[in-house]
Amino acid sequence: MDGIDHLADERNKAQFDVDAMKIVWAGSRHAFEVSDRISKLVAADPGFRKDNRPMLGRNELFKNTLRKAAYAWKRIIELHLSEEEAAKLRFYVDEPAYTDLHWGMFVPAIKGQGTEEQQQKWLPLAYKMQIIGCYGQTELGHGSNVQGLETTATFDPQTDEFVIHSPTLTSSKWWPGGLGKVSTHGVIYARLITDGRDHGVHGFIVQLRSLEDHSPLPGITVGDIGMKFGNGAYNTMDNGVLRFDHVRIPRDQMLMRVSQVTREGKYMQSDVPRQLVYGTMVYVRQTIVADASCALSRAVCIATRYSAVRRQFGSQDGGPESQVIDYKTQQNRLFPLLASAYAFRFVGEWLKWLYTDVTQRLQTNDFSTLPEAHACTAGLKSVTTTATADGIEECRKLCGGHGYLCTSGLPELFAVYVPACTYEGDNIVLLLQVARFLMKTVSQLGSGKKPVGTTSYMGQIEHLMQCRSNVQRAEDWLKPSAILEAFESRAARMSVACAQNLTKFTNPEEGFAELSADLVEAAVAHCQLIIVSKFIEKLLQDIPGKGVREQLEALCNIYALFLLHKHQGDFLSTGCITAKQASLANDQLRSLYSQVRPNAIALVDAFNYTDHFLGSILGCYDGNVYPKLYEAAWKDPLNDSVVPEGYHEYIRPLLKQNLRTARL
Ligand SMILES: CCCCCCCC/C=C\CCCCCC(=O)SCCNC(=O)CCNC(=O)[C@H](O)C(C)(C)COP(=O)(O)OP(=O)(O)OC[C@H]1O[C@@H](n2cnc3c(N)ncnc32)[C@H](O)[C@@H]1OP(=O)(O)O
Ligand SMILES: Cc1cc2nc3c(=O)[nH]c(=O)nc-3n(C[C@H](O)[C@H](O)[C@H](O)COP(=O)(O)OP(=O)(O)OC[C@H]3O[C@@H](n4cnc5c(N)ncnc54)[C@H](O)[C@@H]3O)c2cc1C
């Protein structure tokens, strides 16, 4: 607009090399270069404009999403983008679409659960988008309880086919993204029945729509489930409803990596655990953790830049008022979120490594790390999405009234993000899975079986049950060993307390249900320990760039000490720290905020987000907020005419009537 960088003074204050931090954030120089190039390509292309989204009605909005998805595909082909570049392009287009489920779940489900032959048949079609797929698991009556699904797949040995059927209203598939209006195929989860026997839930590739005219195939009733929360937001997605009326598919369309049905109708189970049927969920939960850092960093970038621009109170001798970012209360709300964005980034990187490792092991029939991979993906998905959804809303409040405008980008970001707490496993249901894993680990402590991986800290259970923190001064809280000991002993003691309480029940399942609220808290403590310890481990690596390590150390300490402050009830009631030590942690936190303050703008610049991706006037790079807000207001369709439509019908008669009343 005026070409001036209104945040230049802030940028000049930075005490570290921002370009080096951009590479740390991206994960590698290569990842940075791809991300930088593709984000600029998307931002410069008017075909990917998104600022009008909140104003569009559902049909217009959806058609616009179809146009963008087709255009994105055209650009991917024209530019010969690699798989990595194509995924980045879809990410920066920033519009939930059927393609998320096609690439994010349909393809991984076939890869993870299909045999070699099945992969060879279906993947080339999916890669070329000659078929478009969804992930059809959830039903109207059951989502969390996968074993409760009702859709049936009954083998007919006469014709060598499965008959897919929805026996009840509640068995209607309900929610799958991309199903409502687009998908030609789906990986559909149904109860496998052979010879009258129910073998539980399995995945099947089912064609849903004609590849000629897109009409539903015989026996299939399909449509969209209706408007969802927020304007624009997730309404670009066609979440669908689907019913089957005795739909026949060939036998080889059952995904047969985990178990098979022979031509004779014999059910055969490979020696792989049946939980591999849930493998796609483990994969997606892992991507959701990485995605949490993206969503939170985006909100934090907006709130941090705006907090430096916004001034309120504090003018002295007619000078400028104070920047709201200088208020300690603002810092106490904002900087832990900034630190969390970095923490989630690094734990996401680690989780990707864990997932890759477990996948490689599975290929050699080593299933030993599967329970841990399930617990980590479930728990970290839960903890990071809850914190991110809450964090985005906090960022909106940090921007005061202007945060409530759609042009701030925050309402839409929240509305798009918040279902992450529910999809891919309700966060509480997933934490209960972690709690089961922890209770099993505690119960095996006396058996000589050494806990490994993220539970290896339980190996020092005797020490953790009785140790007392030796922090004496606020600076002692900067020692990683002091932080780790406090978090490990808190997590261990909470798990052991639950395990001890469970022994008071004769029926363990009854006990688990009765104590579930405590179990969820123990699971959260364990997951927070993982995030803190992975941040600390990141700092053990070589981190090039002037001042970068120091900034990351400050953020790591803020993340840990903020959690310690927020959950001090846990730390105090378990006797891991004293009230005095809790208060010292808080003192240290305040001084860390002062350390981060001059670097705050540079720390959000390191995310390297374009103004297009941020989609926020409050977060724009140059900080020229007020003229942009003023101009945008006039572009609202309500301002197309000075006198609104409806004046003659509804305002004028009212005013006239008021006049008459006033004369009386
Ligand atoms: C860069 C940008 C990337 C963007 C990325 C964003 C991606 C977003 C894309 C699209 C957005 C929308 C996608 C949303 C899609 C969906 O929501 S699909 C539907 C998801 N549904 C669920 O998640 C259902 C949740 N429920 C479950 O997972 C299970 O029912 C349950 C785990 C809660 C219970 O299962 P059940 O079979 O009844 O198990 P249990 O009896 O409790 O346990 C038996 C044993 O199995 C172990 N186990 C359970 N799950 C797994 C697993 N996934 N993997 C490995 N092991 C598992 C469990 O620990 C038990 O073990 P033990 O017997 O040893 O105790
Ligand atoms: C935007 C969006 C997109 C989605 N996309 C897909 C998709 O592409 N494909 C697909 O198959 N599905 C999809 N889903 C469905 C999603 O996976 C489910 O909604 C999710 O797994 C939660 O299940 P539910 O709806 O049955 O919740 P419920 O289980 O009914 O949860 C309701 C409440 O009960 C509580 N609760 C449930 N069980 C327990 C328990 N055992 N102990 C304690 N509390 C419990 C929960 O915590 C929650 O508070 C999508 C959902 C959304 C919102």
Image (cartoon, grey):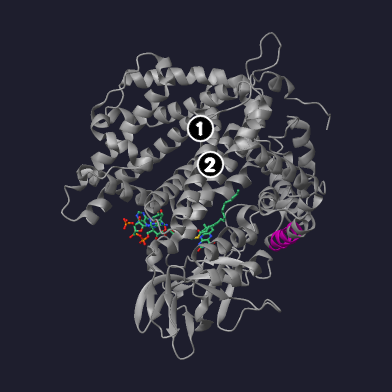
Q: In the rendered image of this protein, does residue 403 appear above or below residue 485?
A: below
User: Where in the figure is residue 84, as x and y percent of width and height?
Assistant: 66, 51
Q: Is residue 59 above or below residue 153?
A: above
Identity, as a three-letter code, of the amino acid under mark 1: Lys
Residue 254 appears left or right of 629: left
Name the residue beneath numbered marker 1: 538
Q: Quadrant of residue 611?
A: top right
Q: Is residue 306 visible?
A: no
Local packing at callout 1 (Cα closer than 10 Å; few below 14, some 14-19, many 20+) is many
Range of magenta residues: 59-72
**Is label 2 in contact with label 1 (beta carbons under 8 Å)?**
yes
Name the residue: 38% across, 42% down: 453
Crowd band around label 2 with a 10 angstrom C-alpha radius: few (<14), some (14–19), many (20+): some
Q: Is residue 25 magenta?
A: no
Q: Secondary structure at mark 1?
A: helix
Q: Is residue 601 visible?
A: yes
- Return the residue at label 2: 349
